[in-house]
Amino acid sequence: MAVSEQLKKISDSVWELPASYKQGMRVPARIVATEKLVREMDEAVYEQISNVATLPGIARYALCMPDGHSGYGFPIGGVAAMDVHEGGVISPGGIGFDINCGMRLVITNLTLDDVQPHLHQIVDRLYERVPAGVGSHGFLKLSRQDFRNLVEQGARWCIEHDYGWEDDLEVTEENGCISDADASKISERAIDRGYNQVGTLGSGNHYLEVQVARPEDVRDKQLAEKFGITIPNQVVVMFHCGSRGFGHQVATDYLQTFLKVMESKYGIKIFDRELACAPFESPEGRDYFAAMKCGLNMSFANRQVILHRIREVFSEIFGRSAEDLGMQMIYDVSHNTAKLEKHTVDGKKKTLLVHRKGATRAFGPGHDEVAARYRDIGQPVIIGGSMETGSYLLVGTASGGETFFSTAHGSGRTMSRTKARKQWHGKQLQRDLEARGIYVRSTSWAGLAEEAGAAYKNIDEVIAATELAGISKPVARFTPIGNVKG
Amino acid sequence: MNSDPFSPSSLITDHLSPMTLRTPITLVTGPLGSGKTTLLRHILATRPAKIAIVMNEFGEIAIDTKVIEGKNVRIAELGGGCVCCSLLGEFEAAVTEIIKKIAPEIIVVETTGLAEPEALVFNIQEALPECRLDGVVSVIDADMLVRFPELGHTTRLQIEGADILLLNKIDLVDAKQIEPLERKLREINPSTAIIRTERCQIDPELLFGIGRERKAATLEPGSTIPATTHKHQPEFESFTFSSDKTFSRDCFEGFAEALPKSVLRAKGFVRFPDSVQLFNFVAGRWELEPFETHRTELVFIGKGIAREKSAILHTLEKCTANKEKMISEP
């Protein structure tokens, strides 16, 4: 893909579209990537990120992470921090509709040799217990009132109902419950779409993987030890999912509201209607923020219930308790959010609403929002690759201020789903993967083809770009051996 | 949904008897506020068949009737076998439940303005062996195109994925602007049929029976085109043609190729010497596929085509081998 002539190289890992690139840009737009990754990006990303730079209140830069590609309004991989005291806006398109889509990682004290003989059984049982696919319902029977409580209390609700360990909350972003989530701000329709989906993976690129930390893939031994990754070929479980139909409905409801008031009431003019937004400090903006937080909590709860199922399955198969199997959770981190954070901009402390859509928060060591257990090493960052190429555990760095302490979230698609389906056949892919030691269960063969490794950017390159830019530091790479695909 | 993945839906499809009638699904897509709900209301008002409309929220359509609470879907009966549904669970499970309970002739699905139709198209083909995708109709707001000239990513995909594009709300824009807008849409999707509408007033005959998923189409043998009892809107005209004679295939193909631009849709059956074929024509693109029936029956729909009717039928008649009685009616 041709790189725009106006794209200025700032360093080997940072590229800039100046504010003169497009009329109305309030700040420059920056892409964090290596030259190779920039060249591979679709040009629509330039237009999208420069459109984001026109939004009221945007601070410093509109940013795109190395795994960026085009999405609804904002690119996926987009980061935009809005100064809420300077008319900064909140935009559903900057958060993503799968509110709090994110990653969770749990370790075991088992090795590849321990797990290999039981792998099919483990994956098959995980496939049964963690419903996947578009029509999936959870096993949790919640009333609408239960669900209202759950979206206000997040993963805390699950722990109180015996779906997990108290410790799990400590290593969940926001301790699994973001405050001021207000269920009175969500529609009945959103509840319809969510109350039977807690504990489900969903479809698309959502998955649950059994992975191995091979000794040669441990990139920082000391840090890995801090996370309990100490045994050669240690087995971990990683999964990726979000708030399902619930988050989608919340986003839809408020996009409709914002489209009505954006221009007529607040005089906000935008280039692309998909950037619909409202001032953060407005009744509509505040309502969406409170409703979006319900989406955050629903998703934390969803992943908490799934973790509980994973522990049950391992415990049943190995005939030992999850505690005995060392199934400690490492972390749970979102990559579709907007959160109020304090950042220093031009030497001044500011309260910014940081939109991260397909981007992961990555606070460095010492930050007071990092879980106490990790405060000296930095916030854990979990980045999922494609099912063929592997995934990473990283930590945030002190030098991440330029991106408001944000980093990549995955490897990012290089081709459309349609193209991937034309190129690969799901069943053949499954056989190929199995020949390479990866056992996959999927609800949809065509869906599996969509997720073929070659349909994604090279995860190693994405990780290298974030390391080069100083926004996150790799700890270990994990290779999948079993996968339940949503 | 969670059946054994080693018996994928493609295999299940193979096990279906070829006689099984698969329910056609039409997807209605388009950005938020473009007029999708208005279109559904309009379709319901004209009710071309026993139809099930799946919409995000049927509170948007005034319903004064009993609502049945299902497992995956909430169903409101509208009379005449038509229903309006809103999902409780997710799409596939809901559609399966609708087919089981209601057995509609047509399912129309309103997608949210945020949806990329591509994903849903695949879901229908992949996970719903009891259905076939009939077509994707995108509603685009002309006024929005003028006010937000930069097309969003998802809007673009909704335009790209459409078999039929309704350029809606043309009453809100300057007449001079319409043609440039059509050109813009055509640049993104050169093969689509673009129809200008106000408040989505369109003849539903234009929307259904596109037969996008042709290979999978297994229509009931011996069925006939449903009679169009509703009134066509003034700017669209239609006429039908039927005959017991046999047509020359080469000649008919030439006829299809030369149909005037004003004809937007034509569909029906044509009897050739060796077989009867289903003819399906959408804005210049057409296909023939085998179909078990006896007579030639065709319907033509387009703008101001009444004045071209005799010329069209004259050309068509020239393709018959023998002179028998022909019937044509307005």
Image (tube, helix red, strand yellow):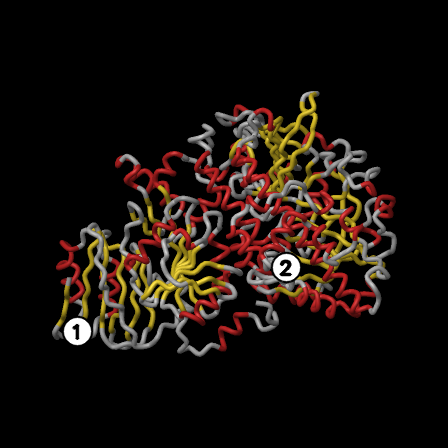
Q: Is residue B300 above or below residue A366?
A: below
Say whether residue A1 is visible.
no
SS at mark 2?
loop
**Which chain does tag 2 point to?**
A
Task: Name the image quarter holding the N terminus of chain A.
Answer: top right
Image point 13% across, 59% down: which residue? B310
Residue A87 x %, y %: 55, 26
Residue A365 x %, y %: 80, 35
Q: Amino acid at mark 2?
A: Thr
Given this view, does label 2 or label 1 mark the residue nearer the observer? 2
Give the Cα separation between the discs numbered 2 and 1. 62 Å
Residue A106 in the figure: left or right of residue B241: right
Residue B126 in the figure: left or right of residue A240: left
Q: Residues within 10 Å of mark 2 (few under 14, many from 20)?
A: many
Q: Amino acid at mark 1?
A: Ala
Say whether residue A352 is visible.
yes
Q: Which residue is mark 2?
A: A200
SS at mark 1?
loop
Q: Residues within 10 Å of mark 1 (few under 14, many from 20)?
A: few
Task: Name the image quarter holding the C terminus of chain A.
Answer: bottom right
Residue A465 x %, y %: 70, 39
Image point 84% across, 66% down: which residue? A320
Residue sitting nearer the eye, A211 or A367: A367
* Contact check, label 2 and label 1, Cβ < 8 Å: no
Q: Which residue is mark 1?
A: B321
Which residue of the protein is positioned furthest toward the top in this rendering? A347
**Which chain does tag 1 point to?**
B
